[in-house]
Amino acid sequence: EAQVTQNPRYLITVTGKKLTVTCSQNMNHEYMSWYRQDPGLGLRQIYYSMNVEVTDKGDVPEGYKVSRKEKRNFPLILESPSPNQTSLYFCASSWGQGYETQYFGPGTRLLVL
Amino acid sequence: AQKITQTQPGMFVQEKEAVTLDCTYDTSDQSYGLFWYKQPSSGEMIFLIYQGSYDEQNATEGRYSLNFQKARKSANLVISASQLGDSAMYFCAMRGAMNSGYSTLTFGKGTMLLVSP
């Protein structure tokens, strides 16, 4: 089954404790992205990747890091989480760079205390 | 910069009736794509429908249709014969022209649709 998986689905952590949210897709997609969703703000792009070892900042990259060492994986790293990073996070992938549909993961709910 | 505006924070509709969710966009790009996604209470993002800026006909997918009015820069989602399972948050999104080989997907703030029996 074609899918994007994220882990963990739910995470409660404390300020400053490094964490990683994993994202994996099995569709051989080149393009992957991370978004955060906050009430009243919709989804905002954090980072995206056009291929292995090619990443770039989205609209809200501060406080986040990403890496793309393999085509299927695109982890999101919070080196020192803060309460304002409490949010719902989505990973997405698509095979093309144009208007192809993005496939979203199930989301990760993060609470930073 | 591109922008998506969804002016309806919430909408109510009765089961079996049709409902229109509004979406207007702002872009200087000539080529772009418009999307609608559904997000039920469980949280996942579900792709509903896509319209390309050069598509002459309005897109349709089952009970979903996209009322595309290019001159007015609007891309409203029409759901016919609403069902209780349509209750969800709906997001309009746009991909603009590609810069350095990538086009950003920009989302609106969403419209919450509640379908009553």
Image: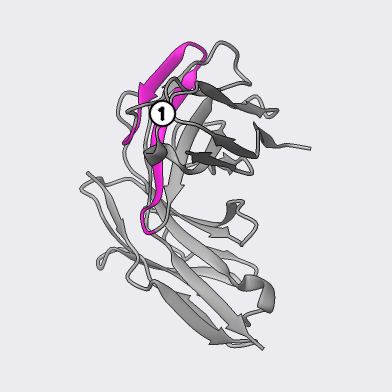
| Figure quadrant of the N terminus of chain A | top right
A32 is within the stretch colored magenta: no
Q: Is residue A113 left or right of residue A24?
A: left
Where residue A38 appears, as percent x and y from the top left, is 42, 51
Q: Residue at x 62, y 72 (%)?
A: B86
- Asked which quadrant contains residue A61, the reply is top left
- Residue on which the image places disc 1: A47
- Asked which quadrant contains residue B117, the reply is bottom right
Where residue A86 appears, as percent x and y from the top left, is 45, 42
- Is residue B28 something that shows in the picture? yes
The region drawn magenta spans A40-60
Looking at the picture, tell me which residue is in the foreground, A95 or A41: A41
Q: Residue at x 36, y 26 (%)?
A: A63
- Is residue B80 something that shows in the picture? no
Q: Residue at x 32, y 28 (%)?
A: A62
A57 is within the stretch colored magenta: yes
User: In the rendered image of this protein, does residue A40 appear above or below residue A22?
Assistant: below
Q: Main secondary structure of the magenta part?
A: strand
Where residue A3 appears, as percent x and y from the top left, is 70, 37
Q: Chain of mark 1?
A: A
Q: Is residue B72 left or right of residue B60?
A: left
Q: Is residue A108 left or right of residue A85?
A: right
Where residue A103 appears, as percent x and y from the top left, is 59, 41
Numbered disc 1: secondary structure: strand
User: In the rendered image of this protein, does residue A76 appear above or below residue B5?
Assistant: above
Q: Inspect the image, locate mark 1, and give the three-letter code of the amino acid beneath it.
A: Tyr
User: In the rendered image of this protein, does residue A28 appear above or below residue B19?
Assistant: above
Q: Residue at x 49, y 16 (%)?
A: A67
Dot 1 surroundings within 10 Å: few (below 14), some, or many (20 or more)?
many
